[in-house]
Image (tube, rainbow, N blue to C red):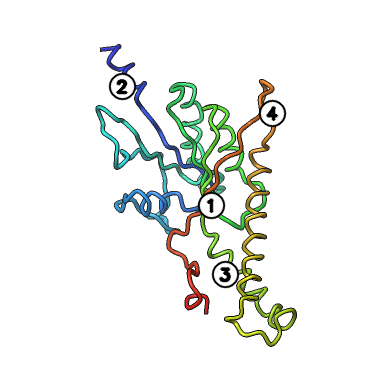
Amino acid sequence: LLQLQRLHLSRLRLLVLGGAPDAGKTTLLREVFGLRHLKAGLSEEGRTDEVLFELHPDGDVRFRPAYLVDTPGFGDGDQLHRNDMGRLLLSAGRWLPGALRPLWVLRAGRHTRHDAHDFVTAMCESAQEVPLVIVTHVDKLFEERYREAGPRWRDGPLQGVAHKDPRWRAQRAVLMQELRAEVDATISSALQPGEDTGGERRMAPEVVYACLGGWMARDEADEE
């Protein structure tokens, strides 16, 4: 029986989502993995209050035990027990070497260092894994910045230029690059890429962007 348990644990894989409150962790599981039964949102009903293990849609309990792990938003100053729930996972990487892959869900626009940054870093160090970083709400951040910058462009370098002119598209592309640079700076500051204690060069994390229900222009008609 002990050998069977060891064999089962050797096949176990955990994709652990971590991050600050309201970053979009549960929404990611709902929209990307189809776990529609999970509650998400800013209400008390929608807030994740415990560590949840959900079998991956392509997983199998016996032969391919791969689980998606949702965690409470780390750094919640009002509900401190939610932070304790996350800390329970910090040693999972040592208990199950090679089984845990941290996934840091980061809300675009949050540039100040947060307790969640330290939590994700500690989990990566425990698992000896580079996290996959998923940046959410970049579309909403773009909208906010565009509402601020658009009037300035209209009264400045793009004065008298029609909205369908390619120069507007080029200006928006510059703004998007600026937002991406801000996000990259936040990630670099939190994960501090460089050499680890063994003198080896740390790998840079893979970063992907997710728009999980917001608006993101795809063609000129939408941009208008």
Instruction: Residue at 31%, 38% (x, y): give it.
Output: 55
The three-letter amino acid code for the residue at tag 4 is Glu
Residue at x 57% of width, y 40% of height: 205
Residue sitting nearer the eye, 184 or 1: 184
Residue 135's label in the rendered image is 1
Labels 4 and 3: the sequence-earlier one: 3
Label 3 amino acid? Answer: Glu
Residue type, numbered disc 2: His
Q: Earlier in the sequence, mark 2 or mark 4?
A: 2
Label 1 packing within 10 angstroms: few (<14), some (14-19), many (20+): many
Front one among 125 and 50 = 125
Question: In this picture, is 71 found above or below 196?
Answer: below
| CA separation in Å, label 2 and label 4 | 34 Å
Relative to residue 78, is residue 13 drawn left or right? left
Residue under circle 3?
143
Element under disc 4: loop
Is tag 2's residue or tag 1's residue first in the polypeptide sequence? 2
Along the polypeptide, which appears first: circle 1 or circle 4?
A: 1
Please give the residue where the numbered disc 2 appears in the rendered image: 8
Secondary structure type for disc 2? helix
The answer to which of 157 and 211 lies nearer the viewer is 157
Comparing marks 4 and 3, which lies closer to the viewer? 4
Q: Give the alpha-carbon distance from disc 2 to disc 3, as whole Å.
A: 47 Å
**Residue situated furthest right in the rendering:** 156
Residue holding disc 4: 195
The secondary element bearing badge 3 is classed as: helix
